[in-house]
Image: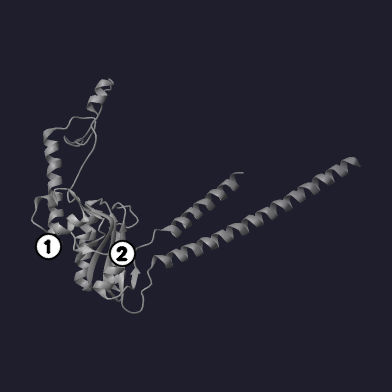
């Protein structure tokens, strides 16, 4: 009799545990469905927020360019061009470029520069750059495409040059008794290797590349600034300038805040920001998807 009771209790426990497991599974399924719906909502909101609403009526468009200009930056050349394309479809009477960057990739800067020139030609509206703290090197390359450039009186501009830098560890590995082993296909493939001495022909080639890139930079700035730019060798020497020095050299046209410039040049302070938003919701959605996958995997492995 005791044996039958033991078997019955065991069966009851197994059935009870099975029911509990099914309840847990249903709760997890419900949880995942809710998270899935929330992720869809987040993606939908992200899609809406990324698209600037085209306002009815006249307005001044604005694009912010901040931080180092690189291909993987939140606002690279591709995203900047997309913003320009959205502005073209609206009723913008002008475009403000809000700039605050030390520069970056000459390729990205050149693409943005040329995109602004094409935009002005197609849209036929005035483009004005307004600098916050700093606009040097590649950032000024971009600014030069604007019809006018304004800054804060304490801003920094200039650094119109090109630089390449690195380190050399030849003496160090010799002192440490390290044998360098390197195999290449191509005589000059390792010309930038920091553990090898710089050969004269490599230095000459690198300097040539820098000069050619600098020449493109100079041509772009001269095209944008025209007769306003002073004929002074220091302008393209790579020197940085205060805002007042920049004004004296013709690098900028004056001082003012975005709203002041908008009212003064466009007769309105109605500014609409077309800057592509940082992909917060997309990152959230991706992160949520990853978390869901990891959680599901973790549960499956238990």
* In this view, 176 is above or below 251: above
* In this view, 168 is above or below 112: above
Task: Please report the residue visible at 51 percent of the width from the left and 60 percent of the height from the top.
Answer: 39
Please report contact status of discs 1 and 2: CB closer than 8 Å, yes or no.
no
Q: What element carries label 1?
A: helix
What is the crowding at mark 1: few (fewer than 14 residues within 10 Å), some, or many (at least 20)? some
**Which quadrant: the C terminus?**
top right
Task: Please report the residue visible at 73 percent of the width from the left and 53 percent of the height from the top.
Answer: 19
Q: Is residue 283 left or right of residue 90?
A: right
Q: Mark 1 points at which residue?
A: 228
Of badges 1 and 2, the one in the foreground is: 1
* In this view, 284 is above or below 146: above
Q: Mark 2 points at which residue?
A: 63
Q: Position of residue 226 (x, y in %)?
A: 11, 63
Front-most of residues 196 and 63: 63
Front-most of residues 50 and 150: 150
Does the image show residue 146? Answer: no
Q: Spot the residue most to the bottom.
A: 57
Question: Who comes first in sequence, dot 1 or dot 2?
Answer: 2
**Which of the 4 image quadrants contains residue 141?**
bottom left
């Amino acid at each position: 009799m005791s044996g039958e009771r033991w078997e019955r209790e065991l069966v009851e426990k197994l059935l009870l545990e099975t029911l509990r497991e099914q309840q847990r599974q249903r709760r997890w399924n419900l949880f995942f469905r809710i998270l899935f719906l929330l992720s869809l909502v987040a993606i939908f909101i992200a899609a809406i927020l990324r698209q600037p609403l085209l306002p009815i009526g006249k307005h001044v468009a604005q694009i912010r360019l901040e931080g180092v200009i690189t291909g993987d930056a939140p606002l690279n050349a591709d995203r900047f061009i997309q913003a320009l394309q959205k502005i073209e479809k609206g009723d913008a009477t002008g475009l403000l470029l809000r700039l605050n960057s030390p520069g970056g990739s000459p390729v990205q800067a050149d693409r943005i520069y040329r995109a602004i020139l094409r935009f002005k030609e197609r849209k036929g509206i005035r483009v004005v750059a307004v600098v916050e703290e700093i606009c040097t090197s590649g950032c000024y390359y971009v600014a030069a495409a604007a019809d006018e450039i304004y800054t804060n009186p304490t801003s920094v501009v200039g650094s119109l040059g090109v630089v390449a830098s690195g380190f050399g560890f030849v003496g160090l590995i010799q002192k440490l008794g390290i044998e360098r082993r390197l195999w290449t296909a191509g005589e000059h493939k390792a010309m930038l290797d920091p553990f090898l001495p710089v050969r004269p022909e490599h230095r000459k080639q690198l300097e040539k590349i820098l000069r050619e890139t600098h020449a493109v930079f100079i041509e772009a700035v001269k095209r944008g600034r025209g007769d306003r730019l002073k004929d002074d060798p220091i302008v393209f020497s790579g020197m940085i300038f205060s805002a007042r020095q920049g004004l004296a050299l013709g690098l900028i046209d004056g001082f003012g805040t975005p709203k002041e410039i908008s009212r003064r040049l466009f007769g309105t302070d109605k500014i609409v920001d077309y800057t592509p938003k940082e992909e917060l919701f997309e990152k959230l959605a991706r992160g949520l998807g990853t978390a869901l996958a990891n959680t599901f995997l973790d549960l499956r492995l238990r």
